[in-house]
């Protein structure tokens, strides 16, 4: 098995998909790192769900977050090579998920205090981490192009929390 470490980032930079290198503390790395963190928190929340439809749906969102993070971790050359990207259908799928949740819970009429139980607490943490990821991506978009579908997907995912 090959080593996990490459030593290529020991001087403070990291490689993007496509071949270019950027500073590890740069906005792009912060953005896709925040998406990765959001995915991990969503995984923690998913682990509280029983097997079934909702767990499968959350897993599907995690898979789309990997795709979204890959795009953010790509330079212009790498982005042209990507075979899969988050698109309008993914945003619509999140909107359907939100609608399905509201069909169960009813419309939200007041702020929800996190921590009703362990599961809701985990999903609230995941929502706040997704919100932070959205802010990081928006900050990146002020200096580099970010597709609107990426931003819209993160916004809907915050709403799904």
Image (tube, rainbow, N blue to C red):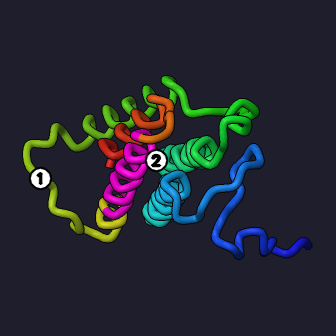
- Above or below, 133 relative to 85: below
Query: Closer to the camera, 151 or 124?
Result: 151
In terms of secondary structure, where does tag 1 sit? loop
Indicate the position of residue 40 as horizontal and vertical percent values.
51, 63
Indicate the position of residue 145 as horizontal and vertical percent values.
50, 34
Q: For mark 1, what is the residue?
A: 111
Query: Closer to the camera, 94 or 101?
Result: 94
**Residue range corresponding to the magenta coloring:** 125-142
Disc 2 versus disc 1: distance between alpha carbons? 23 Å
Please report the residue visible at 21 percent of the width from the left and 66 percent of the height from the top. Answer: 116
Indicate the position of residue 65 as horizontal and vertical percent values.
54, 47
Which numbered disc covers residue 54? 2
Does the magenta portion include 40? no
Query: Closer to the camera, 4 or 93?
Result: 4
- Residue 131 appears in the rendering: yes
Which comes before the other along the chain, label 2 or label 1?
2
């Amino acid at each position: 098995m090959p080593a996990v470490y490459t030593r290529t980032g020991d001087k403070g930079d990291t490689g993007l998909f496509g071949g270019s290198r950027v500073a590890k503390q740069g906005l792009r790395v912060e953005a896709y790192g925040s998406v990765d963190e959001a995915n991990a928190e969503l995984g923690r929340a998913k682990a509280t769900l029983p097997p079934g439809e909702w767990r499968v749906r959350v897993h599907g969102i995690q898979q789309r977050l990997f795709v979204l993070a890959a795009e953010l971790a790509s330079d212009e050359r790498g982005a042209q090579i990507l075979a899969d990207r988050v698109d309008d259908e993914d945003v619509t799928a999140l909107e359907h998920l939100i609608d399905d949740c509201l069909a169960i819970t009813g419309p939200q009429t007041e702020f929800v205090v996190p921590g009703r139980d362990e599961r809701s607490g985990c999903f609230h943490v995941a929502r706040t981490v997704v919100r932070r990821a959205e802010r990081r991506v928006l900050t990146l978009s002020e200096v580099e192009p970010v597709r609107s579908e990426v931003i819209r997907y993160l916004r809907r995912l915050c709403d799904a929390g």
